[in-house]
Structures are given as C-alpha cells and as structure tokens.
Image: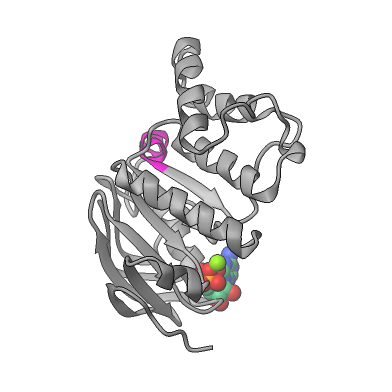
Amino acid sequence: MIRLKDVVKTYENGTDALRGVSFSIEDGEFAFLVGPSGSGKSTIIKLLTGEVVPTSGRVIVNGFSMSRIDEWQIPYMRRTIGVIFQDFRLIPGKTVYDNLALAMYAVDASRREIQRRIPYVLELVGLDGKAQRYPGELSGGEQQRVAIARALVNNPSTIVADEPTGNLDPGRSLEIMTLLERINALGTTVVVVTHEKGLVNHFDKRVIMIEDGLVVGDGVGSYEVKE
Ligand SMILES: Nc1ncnc2c1ncn2[C@@H]1O[C@H](COP(=O)(O)OP(=O)(O)O)[C@@H](O)[C@H]1O
Ligand SMILES: [Mg+2]
C-alpha cells in the first residue's frame, strides 16, 4: 500500500516540487501518474523509492514510513519495490542473465533461488532464449523488458516505472504498457509515470493528474492534458 499525506518537497535550492500531495494506492491497483514536465512526477517516484525524503508530510510504502525510516530498514523496504526507468539502466558489460543475477545477489539470494527465478521472469517478459545476450545486442523494447524482469526478480509487491516508454516507438510502448498491465493482473501493484496521453487513454485505468506540485485530478479513464 502506498499513502502520501500532505507531502511537501522543497529541494535544497528552494524549488517547491510538491506543495501538499495526498493520495493512496491500494495493494493490487494499477495507477498512471500523469502531468506536464516539471510538475513533480519523478519527485513522487523518488519519494516512493526513498531516493528523496519529504520536507513535510507522510509517505508510507508497504508499511514503511519513508519520513522516519531507520537506515537499517532501507534494504528491506527496497525489496518490496521494483523500479523501472526511461533509460533502462542495464549494465552494458553483463549479460541479461548476469544483470538479473546481480540484483538477486544484492539481496543475498542463494544460487539455487537465482537459477530458478531468472528463467521464470525472463519467460514472463517474453525474453526466454535471450539470457546470454548483452544489452547492446537487444532492441530498445527488449532492453526495457530486461529492466522489467530485473525489477521483478526479487518478487516485489510493487513496481514503479518513471516514463518507461519514453525511449520507445509507439508500437513498443504499447507492448511494454501491456506487459505492465499483465504483471499487475498477476497481483503486483503498478504505478506508471507517463505523459503519453494516447497510451494512457488506451487503457481504462486510474489516472492521477499532477500539475505544479499538486494533485489536480484522480479518476478512472481518459484525461485531457493541458499542453
Ligand atoms: N534534485 C533537484 N534539485 C532541485 N530541483 C529539482 C531537483 N529535482 C527536480 N527538481 C525540480 O522540481 C520540480 C519537479 O521536478 P520533477 O519531479 O522531476 O518533475 P517531472 O518528473 O514531473 O518532470 C521541477 O521544477 C524540477 O526542476
Ligand atoms: Mg520526470
């Protein structure tokens, strides 16, 4: 469960990125987070992953209070949340298999768990047979599938994606969004930041609209952006 209550984030240089944001996302939900560039979407994602801390207000992610989390709890919190970025962030010198294995070693998974889990997630994202490829030998859409597999490999309850289709053509974007929808249908909570209106309107999902650091809309279905 994700809960933001009256969240204000003012960066060190004085920028008011969030000016009092409240919303909740229940376990198993799929929500789009939309809004113009600079409206505060990435700041919200970074609050959820613990990369930034709120200036005031409460952020609760899967039972962890991000405003008062102890240092030692952070690895446990991070295990509950998988993150996907626009630029994939794969390690170019490692194979697909090793990119995923590294994410599992980082949380002390056993060799046996790793050998069992990686083929499962690669099949889930439609990349069986590509385990020994290097990222540079894959298309953009395939690289993003690897990143999604990596986000899923430690079986998090929540996936957050910040503009996951920003580097992909429309066909590949739709495939990636459909994959995220399928992952959600298997029980994972999914939060996707995007400003691609056509893509959002293709899916009949909850849309939380952010503008200038505030929630300006929250409902299911299509939306109109102010350009
Ligand atoms: N590390 C930072 N330091 C200072 N200002 C920042 C930082 N990160 C983002 N901002 C500012 O905060 C506002 C919201 O940014 P961001 O959350 O990245 O928006 P979005 O993802 O919707 O484009 C913008 O004005 C941006 O310039
Ligand atoms: Mg952003």
Does the magenta-highlighted stretch encompass residue 194?
A: no
Please give left or right for residue 68 compared with residue 101 in the image: left
Please give left or right for residue 5 compared with residue 53 in the image: left
Most foreground residue, 189 or 53 = 189
Please count the marks in the image: 0
Residue name at image x 39 percent, y 52 percent: 181
Most foreground residue, 185 or 33 = 185
Residue name at image x 48 percent, y 75 percent: 197
Query: Does 78 sit above or below residue 53?
Result: above
Residue at the bottom extreme, as displayed: 226
Q: Give the quadrant of the C terminus.
A: bottom right
Quick check: can you spot residue 52?
A: no
Extent of the magenta region? 71-81
Percent of width and height locating residue 182: 38, 47
Most foreground residue, 75 or 13 = 75
Query: Does 32 sit above or below residue 110?
Result: below
Residue name at image x 49 percent, y 30 percent: 123
Percent of width and height locating residue 2: 28, 55
Query: Does 18 sit above or below residue 153?
Result: below
Please give left or right for residue 147 compared with residue 65 in the image: right
Percent of width and height locating residue 18: 42, 74
Most foreground residue, 32 or 180 = 180
Q: Quadrant of residue 57?
A: bottom left
Percent of width and height locating residue 206: 30, 67
Residue at the top extreme, as displayed: 112
